[in-house]
């Protein structure tokens, strides 16, 4: 397919040191600079014959051809010869250099030098030469026998020189020695197409009977004369402007291409063709034509389409027709009337009509297009929504449809180069019908697509929608691209895309995705959501299930979305995923479950903020490598942590086959600096092994010391609060037991008697009878403790279920461990229940020095009674009454 905007042969221009520069703005300045540079480097005897390349008489300067090498870097070394190729590009040469063993050279590149003339027999020794490139020099003269000896030459490039199309420049026999030539480029040599007496060098060209492909400048109102009929092998001709050459044909008559009947490919884009000067039989003689490119001829205009189509009506071999920008770019919007395409070629398979200000088409247009049409590109227009879109389905053989938009950022016009014809304003085109034919207002729209359509592009189409529910008719669509639009919310579902395999919604400002959006797109294999605004959405819980229906998906691109966090199971259902693109985001961690991605072979995480990866990620990658040796992980331009706590991960990277062995563009970040890796992390690993080993010893020592201190502190705390801890434990145990047994909270005993076993006779023979005589129920361990329970548990239970704990204080009792335990538990009961518990019966006169600190404290802060063994009966009765009273109160 021909496309004029492609720079096909500027092989030597290192364009302005890689600075993107708009040629139309800097054209004048570049001209001066180029000429100055050439003047410094290319001084020779013929400098006065140089022709300026910037005197072009047309207004479309945006696409002027740059035919100078003034901006390239000259190489001071001599020609480089290897593999039968002589490379002499950009050597400041003013003449063809001598080459050792020229008979072995097959390719000779002399482009971008300052050669002005080629003398006779210059190439006499180059008997094996197949390709000769003399483009971008200062050639103004080629002597008649200059190419003598090049009988095997196939490709000759003379473009972008000063070879003006005059008889004195192209001698009649200058190409005679080229008996095998198939490709000739002499375009880009005639910037000033207003020079009088210019004509095509047909006499010189007529000797090239093997020529198949000719690139030549298009002259104003000139025919390709009778001598061109001698070019019996010529099937391809380019006479284009733009970045290809210079062309200003203006008119195409019925004799312009009369003698080029064998042409199959004709490119005359940007030739300033005026549609009013196109003859109805302009192309009718080209009966073998396969491809015709009329792009960038803005003055053909819409009302002259029928003239062009009429001249092509009988060419049954025509398959490709390109008519990009054949309407004035500053014109009003156009509705394509069916009358404009009455004679549309009926054998076309590809038709391109981009950037023609179309806003709609008549409802009958689609039915009048070629029934064999497979590829239709009508992008960069301004289509509005209309009923005519239903008729797209009439193109039953269409497999590719492009409706992409354009930027429409043209330069301000400097004059009015094209007339807006009045007839353009009159049209019978209808894009809407009356309301009776559109159905009920509440009917949902079902879009009809051509049944065999495989590819649909609507990029940069200016679409601004929430992608809600969409219904399409039965179709075969596999590829859908809608990039560079505005779709903030993807709601869905999309019904009818049962065969869709590729969807591209990149650069479309997508912010949220409903879990229903992909529910009916289960056939998707490739999904591109890059360069959107999904960072906040992927932090939310609802994002975790958005990809669940896409079990067949193979590639997923989420790059450049400012993603800082991903839900753990967001990729859990993508069992067939092979490529996951997450580069250019803001991820600080990648804690995602990828164990279900058993077919993953490429994980791109470069240009994030990842410093390490978790063990579950690295373990799964190791598992993948066992099954797929081609697994690739990219963490370049990420701040990999080079500290001791990340040594294991760095060792894993170095030893893993998933990473490039040279770690190109990888970084190492420690506490103070960031450095680029140049030695495969070798020095980093060695450094960390030294530092981290000493750190381990220090860590173990400090950890051990800290552990000892911690144990001491914990032990001290436990000892300090040992009785409280014991009490709380057994109180909780008792409470749990009571709860499970269903008992109430009333006291079971009036008193729990705490005494030493050596004092049991006093307790059993005197104390208990006196208590029972006064109707008190007492608890003693020898009679009331539950067999099989812990002693401590029985003690706590007895204290908690008794109103008071009576301590029979003797020297035996002081020595008893369990008696001391009973006093401490009773004290804890008093503290936690805020009631009086302890009551001491002093059996002996014991000095304070024999009492423990805790016991002395409890005696002084609780009620106690002094037992007198020598007291009379009255005294003893009063003692027992007092004890009973204190127990009850």
Image: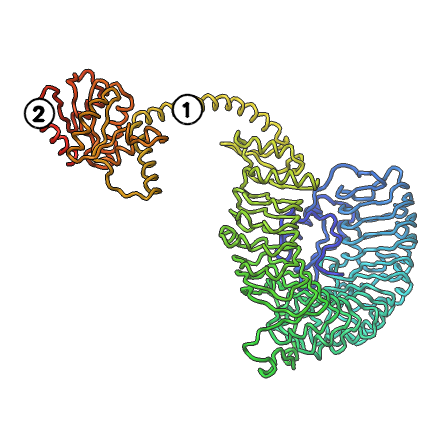
- Quarter that holds the N terminus: bottom right
Q: Secondary structure at mark 2?
A: helix
- Nearest the viewer among 365 and 238 is 365
Q: Position of residue 564 (x, y in %)?
A: 51, 47
Contact between labelled residues 1 and 2, with CB atoms less than 8 Å apart? no
Q: Is residue 401 above or below residue 830?
A: below
Name the side, left or right, on which 595 lies relative to 829: right
For disc 2, the neighbor class at 10 Å (few under 14, some 14 to 19, many from 20) is few
Q: Which label is found at residue 630?
A: none
Q: Which label is found at residue 706?
A: 1
Q: Position of residue 599 (x, y in %)?
A: 67, 46
Of callouts 2 and 1, which one flags the residue occurring earlier in the amino acid sequence?
1
- Nearest the viewer among 754 and 636 is 754
Residue 278 placement: quadrant: bottom right
State the residue position of label 2.
873
- Quarter that holds the C terminus: top left
Question: Which numbered disc, 2 or 1, marks the residue closer to the eye?
Answer: 2
User: Residue 37: in sight, yes or no?
Assistant: yes
- Residue located at (57% from left, 45% from top): 593
Q: Secondary structure at mark 1?
A: helix
- Nearest the viewer among 586 and 240 is 586
Q: How many marks?
A: 2
Give the Cα distance between marks 2 and 1.
66 Å
Name the side, left or right, on which 463 lies relative to 699: right
Q: Position of residue 391 (x, y in %)?
A: 67, 75
Q: Is residue 2 above or below residue 817?
A: below
- Image color mode: rainbow
Residue 215 placement: quadrant: bottom right
- Nearest the viewer among 274 and 426 is 426
């Amino acid at each position: 397919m021909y496309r004029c905007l492609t720079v096909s042969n500027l092989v030597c221009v290192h364009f302005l040191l890689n600075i993107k520069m708009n040629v139309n703005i800097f054209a004048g300045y570049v001209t001066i600079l180029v000429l100055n540079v050439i003047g410094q480097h290319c001084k020779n005897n013929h400098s006065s014959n140089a022709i300026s390349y910037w005197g072009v008489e047309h207004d479309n300067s945006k696409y002027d051809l740059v035919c100078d090498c003034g901006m390239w870097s000259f190489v001071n070394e001599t020609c480089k010869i290897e593999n039968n190729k002589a490379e002499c590009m950009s050597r400041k040469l003013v003449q063809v250099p001598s080459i050792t063993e020229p008979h072995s050279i097959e390719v000779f590149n002399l482009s971008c030098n300052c050669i002005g003339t080629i003398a006779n027999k210059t190439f006499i020794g180059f008997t094996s030469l197949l390709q000769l490139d003399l483009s971008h020099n200062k050639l103004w003269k080629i002597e008649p026998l200059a190419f003598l000896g090049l009988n095997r030459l196939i490709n000759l490039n003379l473009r972008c020189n000063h070879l003006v199309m005059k008889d004195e420049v192209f001698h009649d026999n200058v190409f005679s020695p080229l008996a095998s030539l198939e490709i000739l480029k002499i375009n880009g040599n005639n910037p000033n197409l207003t020079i009088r007496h210019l004509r095509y060098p047909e006499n010189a060209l007529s000797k090239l009977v093997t020529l198949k492909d000719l690139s030549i400048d298009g002259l104003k109102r000139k025919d390709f004369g009778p001598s061109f009929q001698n070019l019996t092998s010529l099937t391809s001709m380019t006479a284009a402007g733009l970045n290809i050459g210079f062309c200003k044909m203006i008119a195409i008559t019925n004799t312009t291409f009369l003698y080029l009947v064998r042409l199959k490919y004709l490119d005359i884009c940007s030739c300033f063709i005026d549609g009013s000067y196109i003859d109805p039989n302009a192309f009718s003689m080209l009966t073998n034509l396969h491809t015709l490119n009329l792009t960038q001829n803005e003055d053909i205009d819409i009302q002259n389409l029928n003239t062009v189509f009429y001249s092509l009506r009988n060419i049954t071999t025509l398959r490709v027709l390109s008519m990009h920008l054949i309407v004035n770019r500053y014109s009003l919007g156009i509705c394509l009337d069916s009358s404009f395409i009455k004679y549309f070629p009926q054998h076309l398979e590809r038709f391109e009509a981009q950037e023609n200000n179309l806003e709609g088409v008549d409802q009958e247009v689609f039915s009048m297009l070629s029934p064999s049409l497979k590829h239709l590109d009508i992008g960069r227009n301004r289509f509005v929504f209309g009923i005519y879109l239903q008729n797209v389905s009439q193109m039953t053989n269409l497999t590719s449809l492009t409706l992409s938009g354009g930027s429409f950022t043209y330069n301000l016009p400097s004059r009015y180069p094209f007339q807006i014809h009045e007839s353009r304003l009159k049209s019978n085109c209808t894009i809407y019908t009356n309301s009776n034919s559109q159905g009920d207002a509440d009917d949902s729209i079902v879009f009809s697509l051509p049944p065999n359509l495989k590819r649909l592009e609507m990029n940069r189409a200016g679409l601004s929608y929430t992608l809600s529910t969409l219904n399409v008719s039965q179709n075969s669509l596999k590829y859908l691209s809608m990039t560079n639009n505005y779709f903030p919310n993807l709601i869905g579902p999309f019904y009818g895309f049962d065969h869709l395999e590729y969807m591209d919604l990149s650069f479309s400002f997508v912010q949220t995705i409903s879990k229903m959006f992909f529910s009916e797109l289960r056939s998707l294999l490739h999904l591109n959501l890059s360069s959107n605004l999904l960072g906040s959405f992927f932090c939310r819980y609802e994002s975790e299930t958005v990809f669940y229906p896409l079990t067949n998906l193979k590639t997923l691109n989420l790059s450049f979305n400012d993603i800082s966090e991903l839900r753990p199971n967001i990729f859990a259902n993508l069992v067939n995923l092979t490529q996951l693109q997450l580069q250019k985001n803001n991820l600080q961690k990648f804690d995602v479950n990828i164990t279900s991605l058993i077919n993953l072979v490429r994980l791109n995480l470069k240009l994030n903020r990842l410093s390490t990866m978790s063990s579950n990620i690295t373990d799964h990658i190791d598992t993948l490598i066992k099954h797929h040796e081609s697994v690739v992980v990219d963490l370049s331009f990420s701040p990999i942590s080079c500290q001791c706590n990340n040594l294991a991960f760095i060792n894993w990277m170095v030893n893993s086959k998933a990473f490039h062995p040279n770690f190109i563009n990888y970084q190492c970040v420690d506490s103070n600096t960031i450095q680029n890796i140049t030695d495969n992390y070798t020095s980093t690993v060695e450094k960390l092994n030294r530092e981290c080993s000493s750190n381990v010893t220090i860590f173990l020592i400090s950890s051990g010391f800290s552990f000892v201190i911690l144990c001491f502190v914990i032990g001290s705390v436990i000892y300090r609060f040992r009785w409280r801890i014991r009490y709380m434990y057994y109180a909780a145990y008792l409470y749990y037991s009571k709860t499970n047994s269903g008992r109430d909270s009333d006291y079971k005993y009036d008193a729990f008697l705490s005494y030493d076993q050596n004092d049991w006779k006093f307790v059993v023979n005197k104390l208990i009878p006196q208590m029972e005589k006064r109707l008190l129920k007492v608890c003693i361990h020898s009679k009331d403790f539950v067999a099989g329970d812990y002693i401590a548990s029985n003690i706590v239970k007895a204290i908690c279920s008794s109103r008071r704990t009576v301590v029979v204080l003797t020297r035996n009792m002081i020595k008893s461990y369990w008696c001391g335990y009973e006093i401490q538990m009773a004290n804890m009961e008093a503290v936690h229940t805020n009631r009086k518990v302890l009551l001491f019966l002093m059996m002996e006169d014991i000095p304070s020095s024999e009492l423990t600190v805790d016991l002395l404290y409890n005696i002084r802060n609780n009620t106690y009674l002094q037992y007198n063994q020598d007291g009379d009966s009255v005294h003893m009765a009063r003692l027992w009454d007092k004890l009973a009273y204190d127990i009850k109160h």
